[in-house]
Amino acid sequence: MGTNGRHSAPTVDPLATDRSVASARPGGRWDYAPAPETVKVVVKPSYGHYIGGKWSRAGAGAFATINPATEEPLAIVAQGTEKDVDQAVRAAAKALPAWSGLPARERAKFLFRVARRIQERAREFAVLETMDSGKPIKESRDVDVPLAAAHFFYHAGWADKLAYAFPGRTPRPVGVCGQVIPWNFPLLMAAWKLAPALACGNTCVLKPAETTPLTALRLAEVFDECGVPPGVLNVVTGDGRTGAAIVSHPGVDKVAFTGSTEVGKKIAAAVAARGARLSLELGGKSPHIIFEDASLDQAVEGVIAGIYFNQGEVCCAGSRLFVQESILTEVITRLERRLATLRVGDPMDKNTDVGAINSRDQLDRVSHYVSLGREEGATYHEASATSLPTRGFYCRPCFFSNVQPSHTIAREEIFGPVLSVMSFRTPEEAVTRANNSPYGLAAGIWTDKGSKVFDIAGKLKAGVVWCNTYNKFDPASPFGGYKESGFGREGGLQGLRAYVRLDVPTGRTH
Ligand code: NAD
């Protein structure tokens, strides 16, 4: 979609000349007629920051956010300076006494309103998210936007019940929260950060990622429409320099960051120097373990969804697959067969499974890892019949077998549709190999035996362990990592803890 609001589809698959439903490809893939999303979303030519309830102009240093599916610019957005950040932090500090002093049920009403408004504008949010991020419309429509609304509903419910969340304590807001988020779930990450912070009476300065600012800016419009007082939410756009200015601002009492481990480490150092609170949701290299007694179709489907849907741009993507040796050949055959049926292409098409990679930089990074996998001697598998659009940042989904634990693709986060398949003989070996990673965000176990599920889940060093399913989220369920995947939890009762100071009976606070 261009700035004129018209959707320009990427070049269509040349093999699919006959789009009638009745033709099958060599790989067994049936062609579907295109089902493009028809909702038109108007994108303004340029966006400034949203500070103290007012919109600024884009100003000097502004840059374009582009549609990764077409490489066309969508809008110009502002590059936040230290001065902009300072203004936003001051606006948040000014709004804090009135917002935290509101009766909690009144704060809840605002959050319920925001949640309902997200639902009312759900298709618009979904289309905008897909335009700006490249993720398939069925993902933004069925996952990102409904979950974002659910987070506001859930935390609105907590706002006047915090005393029950922390019995015997008096929960108080922490203050001004500086929140920096990545590009893979732009609206959902904003909801994960804002909803608990605001429910607990804090005020916020949010910075979306430089490649996906549009839904956060539209969310600011929703806050405006819902009458949320000025300064309670401030959105400052820009790149890492803007993020650095937020996390090191002395007026920010709590920093919440979701992004790469590399940047997370820098932020930890910046925040430690001034003693603000910090939570970090970082990268991952999450393992799946398939035991020989598992339902193989179900397991393969879960693995496919967990790495290829959303182009593998999911922090908890199951990017390492450990298969019990006796079923390795069978699983590889089924993976190849399913890979051939994935629909890669225009993210605005409702049939698309794998959309566009978010940026050229990220596509280059993924391609680099694919080359490394081949050079280091792993065996490459891809759906060769799948042709990619000629414009846009597309990557052919693939997996590697014969992967050694020492291979780079088995150790480093790729953040793309690339899976490493390895084998194991005993449950103990599976646990040891799965835990052999600096990350510890999530894991998946596939087995028919309940006792094995409980045994293995307890031994895995991962913040979330899914059993016979994968990538299931709920606002009531805490999410977060171990080791280099970060610390702190988002969602659930545990997620609220990061946004309150607790007065203990002795009068001390912590
Ligand atoms: P990134 O770390 O490059 O950027 C994340 C955000 O930090 C962006 O808004 C960016 O502008 C900002 N930033 C960059 N440098 C900064 C600095 N020095 N100080 C402050 N802010 C700075 O990450 P990304 O490429 O946008 O996102 C992908 C990463 O995010 C992956 O590693 C993924 O695993 C991780 N992620 C984790 C979770 C989770 O819940 N654990 C969720 C989503 C994404």
Image (cartoon, rainbow, N blue to C red):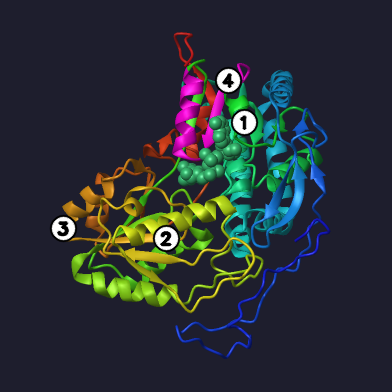
Type of the residue with mark 2: Val
Mark 3 vs mark 1, foreground winner is: 1
Task: Return the residue nearer the eye: 284 or 475.
Answer: 284
Q: Are marks 4 and 3 in contact (CB under 8 Å)?
A: no
3D distance between C-alphas at marks 4 and 1: 19 Å
Task: Return the residue nearer the eye: 62 or 204.
Answer: 62
The disc placed on residue 418 is 2
Per the rendered image, the range of residues in magenta is 249-272
Magenta stretch: includes residue 256: yes
Do we see residue 25 in this rendering?
yes
3D distance between C-alphas at marks 1 and 2: 30 Å
Q: Are marks 2 and 4 in contact (CB under 8 Å)?
A: no
The residue at which mark 4 appears reads as 253
Q: Is residue 201 above or below residue 64?
A: above
Task: Return the residue nearer the eye: 80 or 378.
Answer: 378
The residue at which mark 3 appears reads as 426
Residue at 83% x, 35% y: name it: 57
Residue 103, x across and y down, in percent:
69, 25
Image quarter of the N terminus:
bottom right
Specify which label sits upstream in the sequence, 3 or 1. 1
Q: Is residue 261 above or below residue 386?
A: above
Respond yes or no on whether mark 1 lies under 8 Å from ligand 1. Answer: yes
Query: Callout 3: helix, strand or loop?
Result: loop
Specify which label sits upstream in the sequence, 4 or 1. 1
The residue at which mark 1 appears reads as 241
Specify which label sits upstream in the sequence, 1 or 2. 1
Magenta stretch: includes residue 293: no
Type of the residue with mark 4: Asp
Type of the residue with mark 1: Arg
3D distance between C-alphas at marks 2 and 3: 25 Å
3D distance between C-alphas at marks 2 and 4: 39 Å
Specify which label sits upstream in the sequence, 4 or 3. 4
